[in-house]
Structures are given as C-alpha cells and as structure tokens.
Image (spheres, grey):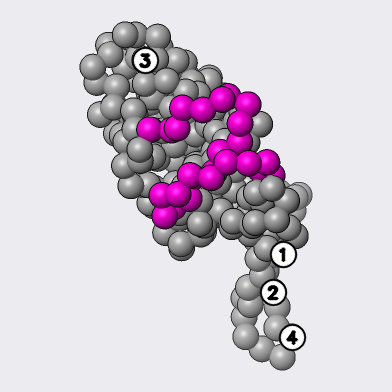
Amino acid sequence: MRALLLLVLSISVCGLAPAAAQPTTDAAEDVLILAAGDTLRGDLELREPLLRSKRFVLDGEREFPIGQVREARLDGQWYAVGRTAMDTAVLMRQVEAGRISLYTADLSWGPSWAVTTPGPTVPMTMTPGGSTRLEYFRKGNGPIRPASYGNLREAMSDDPAAMRVLRRRQTLSVVGYAMAAAAAGLVIGGATQLGEDEDGNARVPTLALVGIGVGLGSRVPFMMRGGLLDEAIATYNRTE
C-alpha cells in the first residue's frame, strides 16, 4: 500500500500550466506569484500551522494558503506549488536553477489503522507512517514535471554529456529494483520451506536467508545513484 501511494503521488502531480518567466527583481526582495497571475511584493513569511495547510503571509497580515500560490521567493529561495492526484497542494523548493531547474518536495504521513477480522474483539493492524522526497524539474519557463527518466530524457536529449549521467542513474535504479524483486521472490519461496529440525527447533531455509541478503544488497545501487540527478542537471546547465 505504501509503495502504491508513493507511486501515485510521484507520477500524478499535476504539471503547472506553462508559467511566465520569474520576475526580474532585487534578489533580496520577497515575491509572491498567485495562481490567478497576480504578483505581490512585500515582507513574506512561510507558516506551517499545526492543523492547517502551509501558507504564505504577506506583510504580517494577508494570508495565502499554498493552494492559491503558483510561485514565491522568500529570503532569496524560490518555491513553486503543484497538486497531487488527491488535489492536495505540494510546496516544492527550487534546489537548482538554470536551463533546467530542479525542485524537491518532502511528504510525510502518519500511521494508519485497519480492522483485520470483524468480530467482538475488533483486532486492528497498524501501518507505520513515513516520509519521502519527491523530485520535479522545469525546462525553461515550461510546466513543472515529475523528474522521471522518461521526462528527463525528453528534456535532455540535446545534451550527450548530461544524458550519459542520466542513463547511469537509470541503470542503477533498474538494478536496484530488480534485486529487490528477486529478494522478495526468494524470501517468499523460502517461506514455503519453513519447518523444524530434528530437535524441534525452527529451521530458516537457506533460500530465505539468501533473499534477505539480496534485499539488503539492493540498497547499494540506490545509494550509488544518489546525487546523479543533480549532476545530470548541473551538466546540462553548464552546456550552452
């Protein structure tokens, strides 16, 4: 369920409509660009109330929930806003600027409970909460798009050097996912061989142990690909 949720969130963020270029202003000036197209300037603050959505506050008085905002610059840092398939606004921070700009969004969720077997005792199971970082990009003044391999390949196809870095990142991703899938198969296969030895002690099949090892090893390709997205975009932005 968690994997499905992350997949839906990562591929279903609605691309923003093609935006006008970010306004050229004093780099120290705060700027708020509303979804309606208005550009406001003043003393900007980002607030995260406990029971309310994130919001920008202009000059200490006017509040703008992030759902009403397209972009903002606060203390020299640019932000943009997208929406998930569930129509939830997501605040994205610009971490790389250039011909291609890179944005990240941090999502977190709390634990969830579910009834497993209806009955007088109402047994419950808990799915722990967690967090993840989603990545997006924008080429020029186009829409913000999820930083999937297909989208990035389309955007960077005119730069062979950047494409080499991007393909290396994709290869590591494929290897990692393949190892994880193989590990799951080995563990499931091993589970069918669970039993006891001659002394009545639980016996863990070798197949399951191998699966656990492969599963732990699957983390290595993902760790190796860390930073390659930044490197690919930086390489693209250095090429004129």
Q: Amino acid at mark 4?
A: Thr
Circle 4 residue: 121
Which badge, 2 or 3, is on the more N-terminal residue?
2
The local secondary structure at tag 2 comes to strand
Measuring from the top left, give residue 206's x and y in whole percent. 58, 37
Write down the region rendered in magenta. 21-48
Q: Is residue 99 above or below residue 54?
A: above
Q: Give the residue at the far bottom of this rendering.
A: 120
Which badge, 3 or 1, is on the more N-terminal residue?
1
Circle 3 residue: 236
Neighbor class of circle 4 (other Cα within 10 Å; few <14, some 14-19, many 20+) is few
Circle 1 residue: 51
Neighbor class of circle 3 (other Cα within 10 Å; few <14, some 14-19, many 20+) is many
Instruction: Calculate the distance from the C-alpha at mark 2 to the C-alpha at mark 3.
Output: 51 Å
Instruction: Calculate the distance from the C-alpha at mark 3 to the C-alpha at mark 1.
Output: 41 Å
Residue 32 magenta: yes
Q: Amino acid at mark 2?
A: Met
